[in-house]
Amino acid sequence: EDQVTQSPEALRLQEGESSSLNCSYTVSGLRGLFWYRQDPGKGPEFLFTLYSAGEEKEKERLKATLTKKESFLHITAPKPEDSATYLCAVQIYNQGGKLIFGQGTELSVKP
Amino acid sequence: EPEVTQTPSHQVTQMGQEVILRCVPISNHLYFYWYRQILGQKVEFLVSFYNNEISEKSEIFDDQFSVERPDGSNFTLKIRSTKLEDSAMYFCAPTRYREVDTQYFGPGTRLTVL
């Protein structure tokens, strides 16, 4: 069965304290791995897509990396406005493009 | 990033009533994905829709659910007889292409079934 697992479930950081979020996946035929940010009561906001092992993408304080079994979202010197739930999702070949989501990591950054 | 609007933003209904959730994309969107998120749980795929037909559906998408494009622009998700467990956020995510395009999610409709 295709599975996506994110850890930790919740993460509390002090402003400026860098850390990483993990997304491990067990799927048959990964087409792409997606990272989204979700604020309370809002729709997921697209951050990155990664397609192959070794690929990295950056956006401001965020950097996403991909291996054959997991992806990391590195947050460098986070600010309070980075507080949100970060969602990982995978897309599998020949499954119509649907996204399979993990549970998410709730990040809280305190000033 | 494409703009997508969803209406209503919040819908409160009684159990057993029918609800229609709407998604209005900008142009060039051919594929539609609907997802739901029960409070505190993960986002789950419901159905994908292309060219007035369902492309794929999940186990959640039973006979109580239907999707259509009634007027060539809006996309609708209908729940015929709502249950308490249908209470959730419902998101649409239109794309231009089936698998190779990023899914940008709408703001969602919060459905509360009493």
Image (tube, coloured by chain):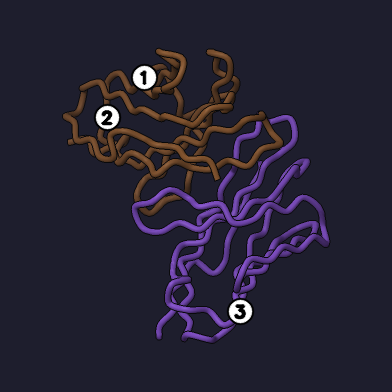
Chain colours: A purple, B brown
Image x and y of residue A109, in percent? 44, 78
Chain letter of mark 3 equals A
Image x and y of residue B46, in percent? 49, 31
What residue is drawn where x is 49% and y is 31%? B26
Q: Amino acid at mark 2?
A: Lys
Q: Which residue is mark 2?
A: B83
Q: What is the quadrant of the C terminus of chain B in the image?
A: top left
Please, is residue A109 above or below residue A91 in the view? below
The Cα–Cα distance between marks 2 and 3, rounded to whole angstroms, is 44 Å
What residue is drawn where x is 27% and y is 21%? B81
What number is the disc on residue A76?
3
Image x and y of residue B13, in percent? 19, 31
Q: Amino acid at mark 1?
A: Gln
Q: Earlier in the sequence, mark 2 or mark 1?
A: 1
The Cα–Cα distance between marks 1 and 3, rounded to whole angstroms, is 46 Å
Q: Which residue is mark 1?
A: B64
SS for callout 1: loop
What residue is drawn where x is 82% and y is 57%? A53
